Amino acid sequence: MIIVMEENATEEQIVRVVDRLVNLGFDIHRSTGSRYTLLGAVGSRITDPRDLELLEGVNKVVRVSAPYKLASRAFNPEGAKIKVGDVIIGGEQVVVMAGPGVVESREQMETIAGRLAKHGVRVLRSGAFRSSDDPYGFQGLGEEGLKLLREVADRHRMLTHSTIFDIAQLSLFGRYVDIIQVSERDMRNYALLKELAKMGKPVILRRGTSSTIEETLMAADFVMRGGDHQVIVCERGIRTFETYTRHTLDLSAIPVIKKLSSLPIIVDPSRAMGRRDKVPPMARAAVAAGADGLLIEVHHDPDHALADGAQSLTLEQFDKLTDQLRIIASAVERTL
Amino acid sequence: MIIVMEENATEEQIVRVVDRLVNLGFDIHRSTGSRYTLLGAVGSRITDPRDLELLEGVNKVVRVSAPYKLASRAFNPEGAKIKVGDVIIGGEQVVVMAGPGVVESREQMETIAGRLAKHGVRVLRSGAFRSSDDPYGFQGLGEEGLKLLREVADRHRMLTHSTIFDIAQLSLFGRYVDIIQVSERDMRNYALLKELAKMGKPVILRRGTSSTIEETLMAADFVMRGGDHQVIVCERGIRTFETYTRHTLDLSAIPVIKKLSSLPIIVDPSRAMGRRDKVPPMARAAVAAGADGLLIEVHHDPDHALADGAQSLTLEQFDKLTDQLRIIASAVERTL
Amino acid sequence: MIIVMEENATEEQIVRVVDRLVNLGFDIHRSTGSRYTLLGAVGSRITDPRDLELLEGVNKVVRVSAPYKLASRAFNPEGAKIKVGDVIIGGEQVVVMAGPGVVESREQMETIAGRLAKHGVRVLRSGAFRSSDDPYGFQGLGEEGLKLLREVADRHRMLTHSTIFDIAQLSLFGRYVDIIQVSERDMRNYALLKELAKMGKPVILRRGTSSTIEETLMAADFVMRGGDHQVIVCERGIRTFETYTRHTLDLSAIPVIKKLSSLPIIVDPSRAMGRRDKVPPMARAAVAAGADGLLIEVHHDPDHALADGAQSLTLEQFDKLTDQLRIIASAVERTL
Amino acid sequence: MIIVMEENATEEQIVRVVDRLVNLGFDIHRSTGSRYTLLGAVGSRITDPRDLELLEGVNKVVRVSAPYKLASRAFNPEGAKIKVGDVIIGGEQVVVMAGPGVVESREQMETIAGRLAKHGVRVLRSGAFRSSDDPYGFQGLGEEGLKLLREVADRHRMLTHSTIFDIAQLSLFGRYVDIIQVSERDMRNYALLKELAKMGKPVILRRGTSSTIEETLMAADFVMRGGDHQVIVCERGIRTFETYTRHTLDLSAIPVIKKLSSLPIIVDPSRAMGRRDKVPPMARAAVAAGADGLLIEVHHDPDHALADGAQSLTLEQFDKLTDQLRIIASAVERTL
C-alpha cells in the first residue's frame, strides 16, 4: 500500500499516519519529496484503505499488490491447465460445453447428447435444479435429473457439467457432476465456495452481473486458498444502461483476465444474450477473442423446452456454429 | 400482454401466434388496425415474452400488468403500515435504525445504545454474522452477538434489527431479532426468502446493487406471496460507472417505489457511501425525498471498530444529524 | 505520478523506465523496497499513463495529483462565492433558478416570472434555442426569446439564465444572459468552452450523463484556465442500468464535489427526473444534501407547454415546494 | 402508440385521454377488454409519451413503431451497401480502415500507408484535428494534415477517412476526405449532422459512450432524413461500472443493429480498449460477430507517436492481425 500525503500535510499528521500503520503491523518506508511525502506500507494484514483515507493529511491510498494471489498470472506464469478426464481446459483446445437448459427426460437427453457427441462435444451441460425468478415455473428434476445427466453422458463418453445452488446439494454433485458451476448470484457466497473448495473438483465461477473483473478474481482466489486450484472463470454478461440485450457480454474481459490471471476463462453467450438468434455471433466472437471454452444451450425442440427455450440453439444451428468455430479456432492457433 | 405484429405480418403468421397463445392458456383479443394487428393476451400463466418475440411476424411483446401484485400500490392504495412493537414503519414517523456495524461486546453495545435511546432511536441495529469479502477479518460473535443485541435493546426498550445470511440462522433470528434484514446479495435467494416468509416477522429486503426497482418489487412480492406482508424495501446504492463513491445511492427510487408500491422504503446511507463524512448529507437527502426510515451505522470509537469503522458516525456526528433530520422531517410533514 | 514496478522487474527494465521518464522531462525519485521498486515522477508534462503501463516490468502507474488544479479545493480552501448582480452562488443562500423550459411568449413569461418573483426567485431561467432529439419539435424563438427573457427578468429585477448550444450564439448571450449554461452534451466541447471563458460571465457546466465527477472538474478547470473563474457545476443525472427514471440523479456528487473542489454545485431535478411528480422530492433532497442551488422548470399551464411540459411544475406545486425548501435550508444552516 | 389504461380507470378518464389524443391529431382505436381498456393511437405527430403517462387513469404508454424509419431494416430489407470509390461497405468484404491516430508528417504517412496498402487496406484513416481532453497536447496539423492524408492515400490508391469536429471544417472535409467520421461526442450534434447530410458523403456515426442502440439509430435516421443515406454506424465502447478497460466494447450491438437496421456497422477496438495489447482480440471478435468493417490505429513507431501511441498497433502486429482476420472472415462467409 502506498499512502500519498497531501502537499500541505504537517509532520504531526504524517507521524500519526505512520503510527497507525505500525500499530496495524506494517513496515513503513517513508520517502519525502519536494512536494509530498509517500509512505510505503508493507505487511500481510488486510486493511480497509478507507480507514486510512479518513486520517487527516492523507490525500489518497493506493493498493499496490493485487487483492488476489493464487489466481494471479504471476503465481502461475504458464497459465493453468485444468484436466478433467481426458479433457484439458486452458490448453490448446477450445472446450465446448453444450446441452439443454434443464434435464427434462431420458429421451430428450439422449437425442441431444447423441448429436453433440457426433460434433466432438466432450462436456454435457444441463440443469437439475433451478433458481429462477419465476418460482412457479419448472423447478428441475433434482437428483433424478443429475442421474440422467450422468447416465447419458457416460453412454456417450462425455463429462457432466451442472450448476449448484445450495450447500445441501454438495454430496449429490460430488456423485454425479464432473465440473461444478457456481451461479453468478453465488459468486460471493463464501459459505458455498468454502465447501466446494474442499471437494477438489473443477469449479466454474460465473462473474456476477455487477462484479468487476478484480472482484471475480478475488472470488477465484478464495476457492484456491480453500485448496482447490481447478477454477475456471466464466463471463456471462454484465448489467449496463443498454437494455436491448438482457446483459452486455463483456468480451474484453477475456484478454484482461488472460493477462492478470493464470485461470482459464470461458464464455456463456446463451444466457447473456437470452435469444437464440444472437447466440452464434457472440459464441464466435468469444473464441476469436481467445476464450478457452464456451457454454452453449442446445435443444432439439426449443419451442417446447421446459425452460430457456428462447435462448437454446436448435441442433441445426449448433451444427453450423460448430463448423464456424472450428475455423475461427484455427485462426488463433487453437482447435475445437 | 400485448403482442404487436409487424406491419407486414401475414395472416398465417398472425394465426400461428394466436394458436400458440391459446395453447398457453391465454384468452386472445384481436384488434386489426389499418397498419398493424394487436393481440391482447389475458391469462394467469407466466410466459417468457422472448418465446413470443422469436415467432415470425412479431414486432414486439409488451407486458401490461406489473410483474408483482401484492407489492403493488393498487393492491393496497393507502400504503402499508408495518407495526413492530409500538413502532410503525410507513407511518408518520421516519424510523431511524441505528447501531454499530457489528456487535463487539456488552460495553460497546451499552455505550452506543444508551446514547441512541436518548435521541429517541427505537430500533437498535447491529450484526452478529458477517459475509464479508475479507474472509480473514472479524466474522462476528454469532449467537452470543444476537443475545447481547437483544439484552441491550431490551434494557433500553428498543427493537432489534440484524442481517441474516443463511437459512441455518433462521431459528436464532426468530428468537432474538424483531426486524430481519436480507442482504442485497440475497435479494433473489428464493430458498431463504421462502423460509423467512413463513416466520411472519418484518423483513427488510435490500435492493441488489445491480437490481432494478421492478426486480426489487418482484422479490418483495415473492415474500408476500409466501404469507408475510410485512416487507420493507431498502435502497443502499447501485453500481454505476462513477467509482469515486463505492455505490451510487439512487434516491429517486424513493418517489418511484412510493408510486408503484404500497411498501415502506428505507435508505442505508452508511453502506452506500462507505465513508462517514458522506453519510449525513445522504441521510438528510433521503428523509427530504420521502424515505420512511434510515439505517445508520454509529460507533462510539470508530477508529477501533472491529468492522466498518470508516462508515460509522461518531456519537457526536449522530447527535448533530438527528437534529437536522428532525427539521427536515417536519418539512415533509413527518416526525422523527 | 508513481510507477510501481513488478516484483520481479529487472534492473534493466527499471533503468529503461527511468530513462523514458527523464526524456519526458520528469524528475525521478527512486525508492527500492524489499519487494518492489517505486519510481516517483515529478514534472509538469501531462503524460498518458498508458504509455508507461505498456513498458516491460511496470505493474501499475498511479496518478498522485488531481488532474485539475484551479477547480480543486486546495486552490481555494474557503470555497468560491460567485457574485452575479446581488446574488451570490456558493454563499449562505440556496439559489433557486426557475422558469419555463422555453420562452413561448411575453404573456407566458410575465405570468410565470411574476409568480416566481413573489417567492423570492432571483434568477429567471428559460430557453431560446433548443437542441432536441426531436428535430421537428418547437425549436425556440432564438434572439427574440432571449430578448423577452431579458425584458421580463428586468421588469421583475431578476437575473437571466439560459443554455447556449453553439459558438455562433456567443454574442447574443453576451448581450442578454447573465448566467450562461453549457449543456451536458457540450461539457467537453473545448472550442465552445474556450470562447466562453473569454467572456468572463458566470458559467454553469452541466455534468455529462456518462462523465465522472473527476472529468467534470477537469472541464471546469479548463474554463478557469481560460480566465473565467466563475464556474458552477450542475448535477443533472447519469446513465445507469435503472430505466424507470430517465436518468439517475447522483446526489452523492454534492458532498464529493464539495470536498474535492471549491466550486458551487447546483442540481437540476426537472431534467433528471423527466416527470413533474418526481421533481419535488429530488429538489428537496438536493438542498438537504448541501446543493448551492437548484434549476427548476415551472410553467403556468404545463399541459400546453411547447416543450418539456411533463417535467414542469405547476405554479401551485412550485409554491408548495418553496415552502418546504425554506425549512430544509434552515436545517443545513442556509437560507432560500 | 398504445395507451394502456389502469384496471380501475373510469370512463371519464378514458374519454379525457381520447380527447387529448384526438387534439394531438391521432386516430384512436379503442379496445375494451374485461380487465382494462387499450387505446391504439395512430398518427404522425411525435408526442412525448410522458405527457400522456401523467394523465389520470393511464397505466403505461407503449411506443409501437421504432423511433427511426429510414435507418430501419424494414425500410431496406436487403441491407445498405455503401459504395465509396470501388470499396463497398456493407457488402461481402470486411473493410479495414487503418492508419495512425494523427497525421504527423509525410514520412510517417508514407511509411505506414505503404505497409497497409500491401496488406490490401483500402481506406487510410488519420486525424488532422483533435478534440482531446488534454488541451495542451498536440492539436493536429489541420488542413496541412488533411492534404498529406489525401496525397499519400492517392499515391497508394486508397480512400481517406478522418474525423470532423466542427461545422467550420466542412468545406475542408469536402475537399480532402472520402469518408467523414463524426465523433461519439457529436452523435447528437444536430447542427453538424444537418450540414453533413447536405454534403452527401459517406458518414460514420460513432455511438456515444452513454447512448443506447436505439438512440444511435435515431441519430442515423436524422442524417438520412437530411438526404444522405450513406450512413455507417460505429461501435466504440460504452461506459459501464468496469473500469479496468477504458470502455466496454459492446459487440452484441453488432447482431442487434444488423437485425433492427439496414445500416453497415463497423467497430473501433483501438479507442475502446486504449492499449495495443488488447486491440487484436477485440478486432478478431468484431469480425467473428459480423462487423462490416474495422477502424484500427497503426503506427510504425508507437513509442514516439504524437498521440494515441498506447493504442496503436505496430506494423508487425497489424500484419499478424490481418492474417488472422482473413481466416475469421472466411468462417462467416466474408472476405477481408
Image (cartoon, coloured by chain):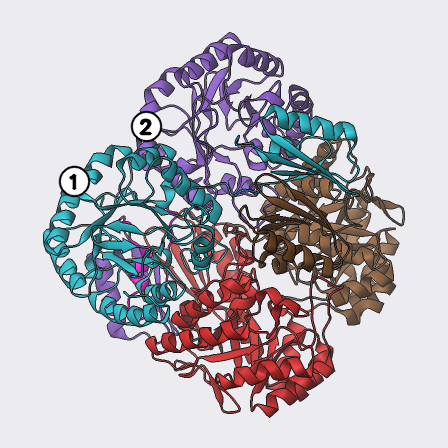
Chain colours: A red, B brown, C purple, D cyan
Which residue is found at the position 49% from the left and 62% from the top?
A249
User: Label 2 lies in what chain?
Assistant: C
Which residue is found at the position 87% from the left and 54% from the top?
B155
Residue density around tag 2, few if under 14, some if 14–19, many if 20 or more, within 10 Å: few
Q: Is residue B52 above or below residue A124?
A: above
Which residue is found at the position 70% from the left and 55% from the top?
B206
Q: Is residue D163 above or below residue A52?
A: above
Observer-nearest of A211 and A7:
A211
Q: Is residue A61 left or right of residue B231?
A: left
Q: Are marks 2 and 1 on the same chain?
A: no
The answer to whether one can see residue A228 in this image is: no
Q: Of the numbered discs in the image, which one, if any, rests on residue D143?
A: 1
Whole-percent x, y for residue C30 in the image: 30, 64
Asked which quadrant contains residue C38, the reply is: bottom left
Span shown in magenta: C45-68
Whole-percent x, y for residue C123 in the image: 52, 19
Asked which quadrant contains residue B154, the reply is: bottom right
Q: Is residue C26 magenta?
A: no
Q: Looking at the rendering, in which quadrant would you find the C terminus of chain A?
A: bottom left
Query: Which amino acid, mark 2?
Result: Ile
Residue behind mark 2: C167
